[in-house]
Image: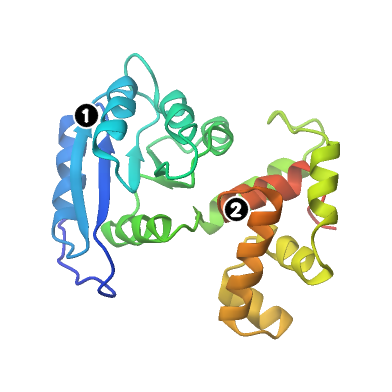
Amino acid sequence: MSATAHHAPDTGPMVRVLLADDQHLVRTGFRVILEVEDDIEVVGEAADGERAVAMTRATRPDVVLMDVEMPGMDGLEATRQIVAGGPGAPAVLILTTFDRDDYLFAALRAGASGFLLKNGTPEELVEAIRVLARGDGLLAPEITRRVISTFARPGDPTGTAHRGPDADAALAELTPREREVLMLLAAGSSNAEIATTIHLGEATVKTHVSRVLAKLGLRDRVQAVVFAYENGVVRPGG
């Protein structure tokens, strides 16, 4: 698969990316794809989770591309440690060849902001990085559908938490419109789709999304999807 040069969509700041994968050829391929982009800079590479955590602290990237299966510390534990850095921590984009539910949910609960399979296109990878760098989370539509279908199964294996008093208190802070936006987020709707559904401008929807995330203490829309289903805000098919 050849990489094609793309110009940055705007003149915003450079997006700093760290590559974490135990296969040298895979890292090289990602680097080739990303370094032709005007707005993306690869700031380092790591071959295992422990090194990824250390290099994240040293290079302070905006986005970490994280493999799941690596020797020693795996990508899921590395993601947990990186996200635990609190405000200012980079977004983590999980990339894996394994299309497995257990990886998906473990990655989301570890705090990943996005999840893509390695058989995607270079364009999808580049766009995913830009989306995460803007502070948005990213789930491919098929991933969102799997989240919904898994939460729909009784006795699902994902460790779903029951709604607690903190969640109740946070949800009580939402206005009716914000609750509606949360439900549409949980269905995997984009801002444009939400705007069409509730007849608002995209800028207004973006403001509502930001307020929902702030009130619920969530980092991005990916966490909002998980929160909504874990806390019974919406139910698949309901």
Residue 47 x, y percent position in the rendering = 24, 25
Q: Amino acid at mark 1?
A: Gln
- Seen as rendered, the residue at the extreme front is 87
Dot 2 falls on a residue whose secondary structure is helix
Report the front residue among 41 and 140: 41
Return the mark for residue 67. Answer: none
Residue underneath mark 2: 144
Residue visible at 28% across and 75% down?
Answer: 10
Residue visible at 60% across and 53% down?
Answer: 144
Left of 230 or right of it: where is 130? left
Q: CA distance from mark 2 to mark 1?
A: 28 Å
Report the front residue among 45 and 235: 45
- On the rendered image, what quadrant is the C terminus found in? bottom right
Residue 56 visible to the viewer: yes
Residue 75 x, y percent position in the rendering = 40, 28
Dot 1 falls on a residue whose secondary structure is loop
* Mark 1 neighbour density, 10 Å: few (under 14) some (14–19) many (20 or more): few
Answer with mark 2 or mark 1, whichever residue precedes in sequence: 1
In this rendering, is residue 232 above or below 121? above
In this rendering, is residue 150 above or below 41? above
Left of 236 or right of it: where is 72? left
* Mark 2 neighbour density, 10 Å: few (under 14) some (14–19) many (20 or more): some
Residue visible at 30% across and 58% down?
Answer: 126
Report the front residue among 80 and 211: 211
Q: Amino acid at mark 2?
A: Thr
Residue 235 visible to the viewer: no
- Seen as rendered, the residue at the extreme top is 72
Residue visible at 29% across and 62% down?
Answer: 123
Return the mark for residue 23. Answer: 1
In this rendering, is residue 114 above or below 102? below
**Figure quadrant of residue 43:** top left
Residue 41 x, y percent position in the rendering = 19, 52
